[in-house]
Amino acid sequence: MEGPTGPSPCGAGNMTEAMESLSVDGCQSDSCQCDRLQGKVKVNSKRYGRGAVESGLTHECGVFGAIGLGEWPTQVDVAQVICLGLVALQHRGQESAGIVTSEGKSARTFNSHKGMGLINNIFNDDAMKKLKGNLGIGHTRYSTSAASEEVNCQPFVVHTAHGALAVAHNGELVNCSSLRKMVLGRGVGLSTHSDSELITQALCLNPPEGETDGPDWPARINHLMRLAPLSYSLVIMLKDKIYAVRDPYGNRPLCLGKILPMGSSFLMNGCAKNGVDDRPEGWVVSSESCGFLSIGARYVREVLPGEIVEMSRHGVRTVDVVERPADKQQAFCIFEYVYFARADSIFEGQMVYSARLQCGRMLARESPVDADIVSSVPESGTAAAHGYARQSGIPFMEVLCKNRYVGRTFIQPSTRLRQLGVAKKFGALSENVRGKRIVLIDDSIVRGNTIGPIIKLLRDAGAAEVHIRIASPPLKYPCYMGINIPTREELIANKMDAFKLAEHVGADSLEYLSVEGLVSAIHYNMKATPSDGVGGHCTACLTGEYPGGLPDDADW
């Protein structure tokens, strides 16, 4: 399946600006879902549009935060750092984005800019000049509902009795309905069906143990996490602090990095050179580490499952850790490795590229085939294709040429346009293809609409055989934890087994990586194992085994 790179059509000519000193904001996160019963969609208000939209496999958002250390005003251009951080997270959301900053002086006023489209179209020079601040948070978003409007952009901001509060959220609350009833029962009005608004309003409630000297924000966050155990990564900004929060199951990613001085230089293993001052000028928090080098930051570590990290001008510290039930294992989304994350990001002590390479090796062991060359659907399947080639001894060779100025096919509005998009997106390298038996590697198949036209393209270019190998197991179940996976009836793996699908798309053969093979490949280079209490992965979209159970309003 085509990976999340390149510009999205939603950004073309669609820039809407909103620069303001904020009062109460209205915002809706990418939280829409559908309830399903054996592929039949039951749509309710909160999850409206999840199964109805024509999008395919999409992540819902990325979050980023930055803060300067020491005396303020800081020498760090916080807004610029956040903007560049969001650019590095653009693959996680291409529909809208926002940045909110604080100068650390007033609890009542934040600076904000939000809009529709790609990061570089939203944040021009004028917008950046107005985003003054010593700390800030940002968000980039996909839409999984029909409401693709600026009012739904994050970060979500409200005014409380204790000052302004800004929240950026990646994920989806599994028990949204019960939490909503609880918040409404406290007399709090909600204007949307947004998880983000719900989280923000829940943070405004006093914790059960009460507060004696102003708001106890770590206690409020702890209370929220106990009410809603998954799924989310949050960055929460107050006047002079940022809290980085990851759900107790660790389902969504979040990591920390240091902003180093301009003259600082360090080796690839992260060790500073002798004589160079590597004391940080600031700290950053991000859904992924892939953008750290581009902003002069060094990866430090992941936020642990259940951890609440406080970031201030004095540094970072863990203020609390909310444990998950003793009988539950960590459930980090395995599709971050397969598809969503950028290849240079680091999860669980390993680079995503290395994990994808190992998936290709495992796929070659499980599903060998006699062929002349191994190739990939660029660029999502390339790392796995190299692994397959190394393991099988069959040489790797490019067979598809990608037009990088065409948007991704899975966000186009109809099957016909999606299939036409494949023809616009790829060309065949006929000299490499003609007369060859090809093993073509892709990372996943969702609806099966794009792989058939690609196979036809290769056959038209003279390929003798085309064997499809998928570096992940069949997708069979929807996700309720922050990924827009279509309804069961739309997932091609629920309609056809591998043999029938090969016939349907015109391949000589088609095989998937097994669930066991995927898990083994992910664990191969990990620095820790599930026996250490970490390293457990959510495979719900593959197996139907949901780490926290089904949503409380699901009927299937």
Image (cartoon, rainbow, N blue to C red):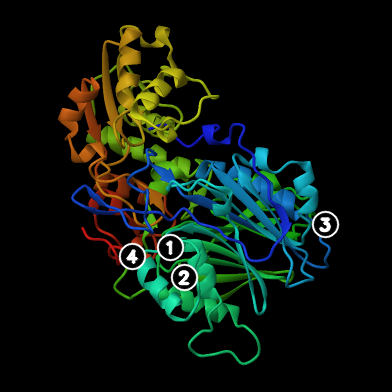
Are the residues tagged 2 and 1 within 8 Å (C-beta)?
yes
Are the residues tagged 1 and 4 within 8 Å (C-beta)?
no
Q: CA gap, disc 1 to disc 3?
A: 33 Å
Say which label, 2 or 1, has the lower sequence index.
Answer: 1
Which numbered disc covers residue 75?
A: 3
Look at the numbered disc 3 and give the secondary structure of its residue: loop
Q: Quadrant of residue 454?
A: top left
Depth check, front residue: 55 or 239? 55
Q: CA gap, disc 1 to disc 4?
A: 16 Å
Q: CA gap, disc 3 to disc 4?
A: 44 Å
Which numbered disc covers residue 310?
A: none
Say which label, 1 or 4, has the lower sequence index.
Answer: 1
Q: Is residue 109 above or below residue 6?
A: below
Residue topped by disc 4: 531
Q: Quadrant of residue 550?
A: bottom left
Which residue in the rendered view is the most extreme toward the bottom? 212
Which numbered disc covers residue 306?
A: 2
Residue topped by disc 1: 250
Look at the numbered disc 4 and give the secondary structure of its residue: helix
Across and down, in percent, residue 129 comes to 80, 49
The residue type indicated by label 3 comes to Gln
User: Within 10 Å of the Cα at label 4, are there few (<14), some (14-19), or many (20+) other Cα atoms?
Assistant: few
Look at the numbered disc 1 and give the secondary structure of its residue: loop
Across and down, in percent, residue 349 comes to 48, 54
User: Within 10 Å of the Cα at label 3, are there few (<14), some (14-19), or many (20+) other Cα atoms?
Assistant: some
Of circles 1 and 4, the one toward us is: 1
Q: Is residue 293 above or below residue 383?
A: below
Depth check, front residue: 167 or 312? 167
Q: Quadrant of the N terminus?
A: top left
At 51% from the left edge and 25% from the top edge, which residue is drawn?
406
User: Within 10 Å of the Cα at label 1, are there few (<14), some (14-19), or many (20+) other Cα atoms?
Assistant: many
